[in-house]
Each structure stands twice: as structure tokens, then as C-alpha cells.
């Protein structure tokens, strides 16, 4: 079995310590952080997603796998964060109200930090008002909202409204993403940017920062 398959396999078994060791091995062998993330960690998490959907595994197993994913991803963070890069702008990020999924949001945060953004993480289950207030308090350039549920992605529309109500709509870029979110949904709620994955989110943030 190759190293990436080994990472994916152990992630599915929830063996956080083994995943950490294997990710470190992959780093030491000179693999890119992107490859380790996509071909190892995310590939394992995708299998978990399919099994969860098919009722082959349940929430405890998913949580244990998620813990292993986070343990491995944490080792990649220093590789993604370029040292000494001047802040490109400030981002407030969070998972929308009613939604507790944070693995994707954490990856987006990591990638944005890697591009030199100063990222304030509001966590999960973040209300629209909290996003808007944080954007005001932090003088944010970008408000980044993640949602993984079709039932919670609708909260993003509330974030757009709350940011407008706070009087800063013309000062901030609102970025949305997460598995059920699409570009047409982004446009339909009046948000500014949609990104399908963490790397594109960081690139889109860069493009927005350069453009502003
Ligand atoms: Co849940 N869950 N979950 N879950 N869970 C999904 C999302 C689901 C698709 C599973 C399924 O049925 N196949 C399904 C949603 C169905 C739907 O609405 N369409 C689902 C469900 C139903 C639920 C519960 C309701 C289950 C229940 O209780 N009956 C419940 C809801 C809890 C809540 O939030 N209120 C629930 C709970 C959980 C756990 C707590 C057990 C756990 C979350 C642990 C955690 O995050 N700390 C969990 C998990 C892990 C998943 C799956 C298996 C994996 C999600 C994940 O982390 N993927 C997921 C199935 C799946 O996705 N295949 C599932 C890996 C991650 C890297 O990808 O988050 O998509 P993702 O992020 C990507 C992109 O989407 C994008 O970049 C990331 C990386 O490239 N992205 C952005 C994300 N945010 C972005 C923001 C951006 C830009 C890009 O800009 C701002």
C-alpha cells in the first residue's frame, strides 16, 4: 500500500497518532502539503462521507475520523503558512448558524493564512449578526461563511443582510462555500464570491485583495 493510501486507511479507522506519524513521514519524504491533503487525508474523509451517507457508519466513527483528519492537517499548517508574509488583509471566517461542520472551514482558514491573510476564526454555529459584528470590530476585508448542510446554507443570505444592515456592505467581500453551496446560489443571495475548495478560496481571496 502506498503512503497516501495508508494515510487514508488509518484516517478511516480514526487512528489519529498513526495518521500524524504517516503525514510526518510523507512530509519528510518531500511530498507537497497539497498532495498529502488531497490524496491522503481528504481521500480518506471522502470514504467516510460515503459510508456515513449509506448508514454503514455513524456519528461516533465520523467524529473519530474527523479528529484524525484534524491531527494530520495540523502538521501541514506550517507548510502552508509562508513565514514572514505581510498580511494581505483581514478575514473573519466561521461556519453558519445551526451547522457544526468545521473541517472544511479549518482548511480554508489554513490556506488563507498560507497566502498571508490575517484570519479571525469565529468557530461553528455563528449567527448572521455575529459575523456582521465581528466584521465591524475587526475591520475585516472579507467575511467567509462555510455551510455543509442544505438546511443551514440559507443562513448565508442572513449574513449578507446583516452585513448590509451594519452599514459595511461596500467595504467587505462576502465569500461563501461548502459542499452544498454553488456559484449560482452565491449570486442568488447577493454574496460576492464562491469557491469550491480551500485552495480556490485562498486564491479568490487573493484576487479580491489585489483588486481592492
Ligand atoms: Co455531517 N453531514 N452531519 N457530520 N458530515 C454531511 C455534510 C452529509 C453530506 C453526510 C451525508 O449524508 N452524506 C450530510 C448533509 C446532507 C445535506 O444537508 N445535504 C450531513 C448530515 C446530514 C449531518 C447531520 C444532520 C447528521 C445527523 O445528526 N443526523 C449532523 C448535523 C450536525 C450539525 O451541523 N448541526 C452531522 C454531523 C456531523 C459530525 C458532527 C458527525 C461530523 C462533523 C465533524 C466536524 O466537522 N468537526 C460530520 C461530518 C464529518 C460529515 C462528512 C462525513 C464529512 C464533512 C467533511 O468534513 N468533509 C459529510 C459527508 C461528506 O462531505 N462527504 C457530512 C471534508 C472537508 C474537507 O470537506 O467540509 O466539504 P468540506 O470542505 C471543502 C469544501 O466544501 C470547501 O473547501 C473544503 C476543502 O477543500 N469549503 C469552502 C468548505 N467551506 C468553505 C468555505 C469557503 C470556500 C470553500 O468560503 C468561505
Image (cartoon, rainbow, N blue to C red):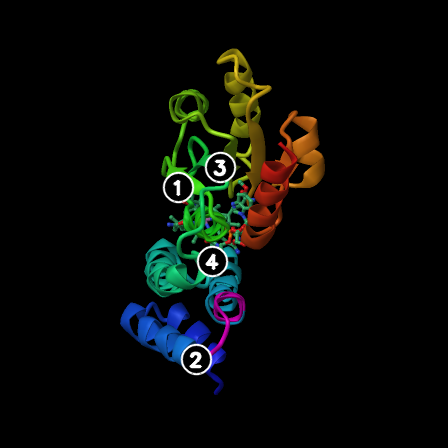
Crowding at label 3, few (<14), some or many (≥20) Cα neighbours within 10 Å? some
Q: Mark 2 touching mark 1, by CB under 8 A? A: no
Mark 4 Cβ inside 8 Å of ligand 1: yes
The total number of labels drawn is 4
The percent position of residue 94, horizontal first and vertical second, equals: 43, 37
User: What range is drawn magenta here?
Assistant: 29-38
What's the mark number on residue 100? Answer: 1
Mark 1 Cβ inside 8 Å of ligand 1: yes
Quadrant including the C terminus? top right
> Which residue shows up at 37% across the image and 80% down it?
25
Which type of secondary structure does the marked residue at label 2 adopt? helix
What's the mark number on residue 10? Answer: none
Residue at label 4?
52
Q: Mark 2 touching mark 4, by CB under 8 A? A: no
Residue at label 2?
6
Which type of secondary structure does the marked residue at label 3 adopt? loop
Answer left or right for 21 relative to 32.
left
Instruction: Say whether residue 177 is visible.
Output: yes
Residue furthest to the bottom in view is 1
Name the N-terminal-most of marks 3 and 4.
Answer: 4
Crowding at label 2, few (<14), some or many (≥20) Cα neighbours within 10 Å? some
Viewer-side label of 3, 4: 3
Name the N-terminal-most of marks 3 and 2.
Answer: 2
Name the N-terminal-most of marks 2 and 4.
Answer: 2
Viewer-side label of 1, 3: 3
Can residue 43 be found in the magenta stretch?
no
> Which residue shows up at 52% across the image and 33% down it?
142
Q: Is residue 100 placed above or below 4 in the rendered structure? A: above
Can residue 35 be found in the magenta stretch?
yes
Amino acid at each position: 500500500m502506498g503512503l497516501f493510501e495508508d494515510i487514508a486507511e488509518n484516517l478511516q479507522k480514526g487512528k489519529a497518532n498513526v495518521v500524524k506519524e504517516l503525514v510526518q513521514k510523507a512530509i519528510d519524504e518531500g511530498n507537497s502539503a497539497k498532495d498529502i491533503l488531497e490524496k491522503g487525508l481528504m481521500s480518506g474523509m471522502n470514504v467516510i462521507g460515503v459510508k456515513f451517507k449509506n448508514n454503514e457508519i455513524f456519528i461516533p466513527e465520523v467524529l473519530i475520523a474527523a479528529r484524525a483528519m484534524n491531527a494530520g492537517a495540523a502538521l501541514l499548517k506550517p507548510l502552508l503558512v509562508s513565514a514572514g508574509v505581510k498580511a494581505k488583509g483581514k478575514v473573519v471566517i466561521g461556519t453558519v448558524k445551526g451547522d457544526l461542520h468545521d473541517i472544511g472551514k479549518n482548511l480554508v482558514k489554513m490556506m488563507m493564512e498560507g497566502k498571508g491573510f490575517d484570519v479571525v476564526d469565529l468557530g461553528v454555529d455563528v449567527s448572521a449578526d455575529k459575523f456582521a459584528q465581528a466584521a465591524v470590530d475587526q475591520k475585516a476585508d472579507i467575511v467567509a461563511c462555510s455551510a455543509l448542510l442544505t438546511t443551514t446554507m440559507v443562513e448565508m443570505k442572513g449574513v449578507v443582510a446583516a452585513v448590509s444592515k451594519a452599514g459595511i456592505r461596500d467595504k467587505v467581500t462576502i465569500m461563501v462555500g461548502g459542499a452544498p453551496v454553488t456559484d449560482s446560489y452565491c449570486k442568488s443571495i447577493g454574496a460576492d464570491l464562491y469557491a469550491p475548495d480551500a485552495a480556490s478560496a485562498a486564491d479568490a481571496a487573493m484576487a479580491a485583495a489585489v483588486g481592492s
